[in-house]
Amino acid sequence: MKSILGSTRCPDISFHRNGQIDITARISNAIGIEEGDVIDIAEDRGEYYLYVRVKSAEVVGRHEARCYPTKRGKKGRGRNLRAYSKRLCDFVLSCSGSCDVARVPAGKSEDIPSLGKAINVILGCNL
């Protein structure tokens, strides 16, 4: 017998070749990403962590990888976010071995002294 669905694991973050980054509500809630925050990825001993580099209250001017809601409407509804960063996407696509899109899972959130609240992103597993 052969399974029709195969893997049923849904991705937590999607990185597209054009620089678009889609972040699910689980991730934004886990590390407290809000509209206007700037995200980044840090590497530590072979592990990659997504974290908020600059909070929206501290942002001055234009920034790469600034988060925006994917759905406009009532405040507090819909926590899926989108950011744009060609450099982050190119890095993730090269790490995951993908050409067009990398849909990757994430682990649990952690408090890292130098970064604050961050979440482990599993770049080697492209769903």
Image: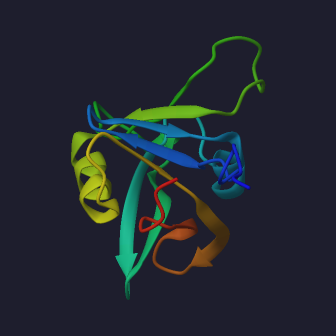
Q: Is residue 56 above or below residue 27?
A: above
Picture coordinates of residue 102, whole percent (x, y): 40, 48
Q: Position of residue 86 (x, y in %)?
A: 23, 40
In screen coordinates, is 62 left or right of 117?
left
Residue at 39% x, 43% y: name it.
15
**Front-most of 44 and 60?**
44
Where on the picture, by quarter, is residue 77?
top right
In the image, residue 107 above or below residue 45:
above
Q: Residue furthest front?
A: 1
The residue drawn where x is 75% and y is 20% is 75
Query: Which residue corresponds to the image point at 66% horizontal and 68% vertical from the top-left?
Result: 109
- Compare residues 17 and 2 and report the one nearer the observer: 2
Quadrant in the picture for residue 20: top left
Left or right of residue 1: residue 120: left
* Residue 83: % across, % down: 42, 35
Relative horizontal placement of residue 110, taking residue 54 as reference (left or right): right
Could you say which is closer to the camera, residue 8 or residue 63? 8
Vertical order, 81 against 27 (above or below): above
Report the quarter where the N terminus lies: bottom right
Tell which of 66 and 26 is nearer to you.
26
